[in-house]
Amino acid sequence: METKNIMIVGVGGQGSLLASKLLGTLLVSEGYDVKVSEVHGMSQRGGSVVTYVRFGDKVYSPVISEGEADFIVSFEKLEAARHAACLKKDGKIIVNLQEIDPMPVVTGAAEYPNAVVDELKSKGVFVDGIDALSLATEAGSAKAVNIVLMARVAKYFDIPYEKWIAAIEKTVKPQFVELNKKAFEIGYNY
């Protein structure tokens, strides 16, 4: 199998690292060679967090270069735009439609750009936008945005629903398993 590349991008504190762990656990259980690499930046201060997940028969490097990503899973609209150049020509962006103001917007030095998703689509980029925050809140916690997004990703993979749930049970702390299973179900059926 040709190596597949997934970038998970977001802002510190959104759970992108758990999402990559979940995805890695699932793909290993499916028999793939998997490499995961995390780039934290100023993650604890609301800065960008990027995680690379690469899988296939044999993967030699964990890093995804410009134009190589089959999927970009973005926890926030501006992060999707920031990393769009990494997408393959026929790649897909799955994006949470939430807006989190970066520091220049917070300080008043800049304004949050309008129509980020529309601009990406106008350039021919496949964008699957979802209000993951509302769905996570419906499940019981705004912190479950990561699991709602993984449920949306699951729609593009030929891996049974039950295997995703098993991966959640392996990677999520026991006290949060039921909440995350509910978030996955809501996101998957949306």
Image: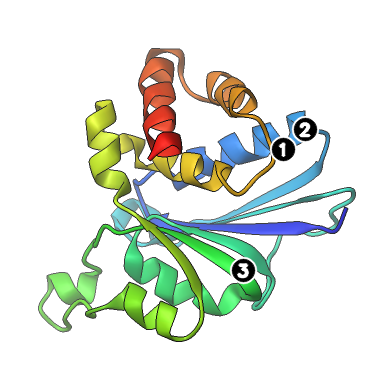
Mark 2 → mark 1, Cα distance in angstroms? 5 Å
Whether residue 61 sits left or right of residue 161 in the image: it is right
Residue at point 46%, 19% (across, down): 173
Q: Position of residue 9 (x, y in %)?
A: 47, 59
Residue at point 35%, 46% (across, down): 14
- Near-viewer residue (17 or 72): 72
Q: Can residue 142 be seen in this snapshot?
A: no
Please give the count of numbered marks on the rendered protein.
3
Q: Can residue 100 be seen in this snapshot?
A: yes
Q: Position of residue 142 (x, y in %)?
A: 25, 37
Please rate how many residues cluster around mark 3, counting C-alpha atoms within 10 Å: few if below 14, some from 14 to 19, many from 20: some
Q: Please identify, in this view, whether the residue under mark 3 or under mark 1 is nearer the observer.
A: 3
Q: Which residue is mark 1?
A: 27
Please rate how many residues cluster around mark 1, counting C-alpha atoms within 10 Å: few if below 14, some from 14 to 19, many from 20: many
Q: Which residue is mark 2?
A: 30
Circle 1 — which element?
helix
Q: Are marks 2 and 1 in contact (CB under 8 Å)?
A: yes
Compare marks 3 and 1 and give the one earlier in the sequence: 1
- Quarter holding the C terminus is top left
- Near-viewer residue (143 or 152): 152
Residue at point 83%, 34% (across, down): 31
Q: Position of residue 184 (x, y in %)?
A: 44, 31
Compare marks 3 and 2 and give the one earlier in the sequence: 2
Above or below: residue 164 compared with residue 23: above
Q: Which residue is mark 3?
A: 91
Q: Amino acid at mark 2?
A: Glu
Q: Position of residue 148 (x, y in %)?
A: 40, 39
Mark 3 → mark 2, Cα distance in angstroms? 22 Å
Mark 3 → mark 1, Cα distance in angstroms? 19 Å
